[in-house]
Image: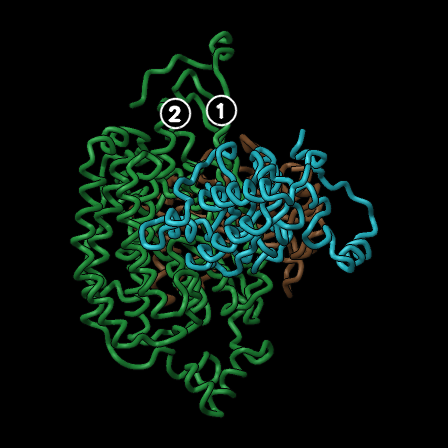
Chain colours: A cyan, B brown, C green
Amino acid sequence: MSSNIQPASNGLFWTTLDAAANWSRANSLWPMPFATACCGIELMSTSASKHDLSRFGSEVMRFSPRQCDLMIVAGRVVMKMLPVLQRIWLQMPEPKWCISMGACACSGGVFDTYAVVQGIDRFMPVDIYVPGCPPRPEQLIAAIIELQAKIQKTGTLRATEFADRTTPEGPARFDGDELVRIRDRNPVQFNLPVYDPRH
Amino acid sequence: MMNSTEPQKIALEAALSAVPGPRAWSTFRDSLRLNIDAISLVPTMTRLREVGLNMLIDLTAVDLLEYADATDRYRMVYQLLDTESGARVEVRTHVNDPEPKLPTMTTLWSSANWMEREAYDMFGIVFTGHPNAKRLLLPDEFASFPLRKDYPVKGRGERHNFPVVTRSES
Amino acid sequence: MPLELLEPTSDPSYREGLWTLNFGPQHPATHTTLRLVLTLDGETVVDAEPDIGFLHSGFEKLGETLDFNQYVTIVDRMNYISPLANEIAWHHVCEKLLDIELTPRCTYLRTILAELMRISDHLLCVGACILDLGGISAFMYAFNERERIYELCEQVSGQRFHTSFTRVGGLLFDVSDQWLANLKDFITTFPKMFKDVNRLVLKNRIFIERCQGVGILSREEAICGGATGPVARASGVTRDLRRDEPYLAYADLDFDVICSRAGDCFSRFQVRMLEIEESLKIIDQAMQKLPGGPIFAEGSGKELLPQKREVYTSIEGLIHHFEAIMPNRQLQPPKESLYAATESPNGELGFYIVSDGTFRAYRARTRPPSLVHFALFPQLIRGCMLSDVVAVLGSLNIIAAELDR
């Protein structure tokens, strides 16, 4: 967002507009359910009739990224799926938020294996983390409420708060000593495949 | 418990009498196993299918690199089932490095198609004559065979090799 | 309804008119992460090439690093809509390998839990498919019933699903009388709710029109393709491991095996819905016959896990627990390999364990029914319309985690 148009953004007019925008955005978060595994079933349970997610504004689970503003990554993300995840994230229009649901999306979970990405925050910006394997529906609802509070507190009308997040927020791509261990064990240079979702 | 597989073993041995090659039968917890050489795989399987074992339940490989007293590297295991009588047989054969190769079973049972692709994906065993010999589960660019014993559980860094998307640019 | 097709390969100008549609891996109807590359002639599907592996997490590699009691937590996460069925299958193989005979109470409890999971799985399969086809109310009703099953699971094990409840030789906890009363309550009130789901699904004109005659799997194709479970039984293959190779308490219980000759989507759903009713019968009989007694196998000395109460309150329990958990003191299986299977809701779920004499599998292979069924998908969908793809995919009940492991 263009950060040079910020005239008197702490003025009463702008902050009232911000508050109004935050209120409407927070209370109508349309989720994009990126359900890959078991957490997807808990996501479906959360939107089913017992723990009804639409009470909190998430009435419609639109599966088209162009129509959503909240991406809930529910389930483990593997190597083959990560470019798909990144591409869908890039297709979502601003303002958008991301909830990383479940232990596998937050950190790899039980699956510390060759195939599972150890936390999507290594490669994607995440706003709220929901622990659990799988998290109870109540936990997911608590996460949505927290996200609503976050939007109310830090949101702006022109979605300028995202422009400040220029550095990756998750753990480093390689943990420091993991890289050393990999290099020590495999002295031969090998060609790793490179994925770019922006082609 | 041992007796329940004897009649089946006798019947199958009689049916396979025309097929050349050494055969070793064994029984464990009332499951019957047949150990054959890779060369006699196709005639044995064809004959077994003719005598009624019409479903291939499972096809997998085991890497015996770290198994004590193993003479070959890869053991291929085929689980066969006769849907009429309910009889089961496990057929085993062995292949070795370099270039482990076996003939495909897709002409006999179409369930072998994807299972052989997965065995190639995970172990690197090539099935000659397979209609679609590509990787099944891992990305095509993946360079290793993960279920081999010399590949570490955590991988060699492939899971970290992706571009990072920051919030301000997405 | 399948339409007549021109010979696609001989006419090059025909091939030029075909177009490719990418279906998935992110799509509501693909039940998490499946990808299909469809070649279409207008709306008719000429070819479908599945691309899988978007959830491949290295389960089998993990099976070589965790022992028999630890791996149950991973096995849970395979067919995640009926987790206890996977656990029961895994420990069935482990116990067969270790030659452990379960106590009568344990067998009956495992039977009850397996049938509860069968109800849960079939409800989700039918509910999710009718959600994809547009009938959202049936999905809500089905999920409401599944919430009650989740409550039962939570009361018995502490977790809604991914219970990790079975152990080698027994179960984690014994069930209380309150749980049995809740279960009785469930099976008396379930039929009425189930009748509603039945009316919304099987007597739904639109559902019938969309599913009847679509995706026909013939008996020979099912056998050659290795199909098992409801998919095979709907095509006329009358195999059910509960009756043909009885395990747990199924030999003492009276139930019917539901089969059909039609082999289309609608018959697969019908088989599933009727199997739910059979499961209720089984649970009822098992509850009436439920014996008392210990949960863990007797005569096992120090090798199997003692009850948690003993562990926390007595020194012998603590010692037994230590003996069962520490790696160099556990039960030693014979250095053999074994394949055994149970009738999971999706089909024949088997494990092939190669043991090297320690309490950890040298190779723990899962025989996934979903992989075999998804391989059948291209031949089912040829000649059908694009909207039939959703119906056929739903009827096969492909669980991506079991498919990719």
Task: Name the residue rendered at 67%, 53% in the picture.
Answer: A170
Q: Is residue B61 visible from the viewing direction of this image?
A: no
Q: At which x and y percent is residue B18?
A: 45, 43
- Characterize the local packing of mark 1: few (<14), some (14-19) or many (20 or more) Cα atoms within 10 angstroms: some
Q: Residue A14: percent from the left, percent from the top?
A: 59, 40
x then y, percent, for residue C99: 42, 72
Q: Give the number of the disc on residue C21.
A: 1
Residue B12 shows up from this direction: yes
Q: Residues within 10 Å of mark 2 (few under 14, many from 20)?
A: some
The disc at residue C386 is 2
Do the CB atoms of the residues marked 2 and 1 lie less than 8 Å apart? yes
Specify the amino acid type for callout 2: Leu
Which residue is found at the position 25% from the left and 33% from the top? C207
Q: Amino acid at mark 1?
A: Leu
Circle 1 — which element? strand
The residue nearer to you, when weighing C206 against C271, is: C206
Query: In the figure, is residue A167 to the left or right of C352?
Result: right
Residue at coordinates 53% horizontally, 60% vertically from top-left?
A: A131
| Residue drawn at point x = 42 percent, y = 55 percent | C350
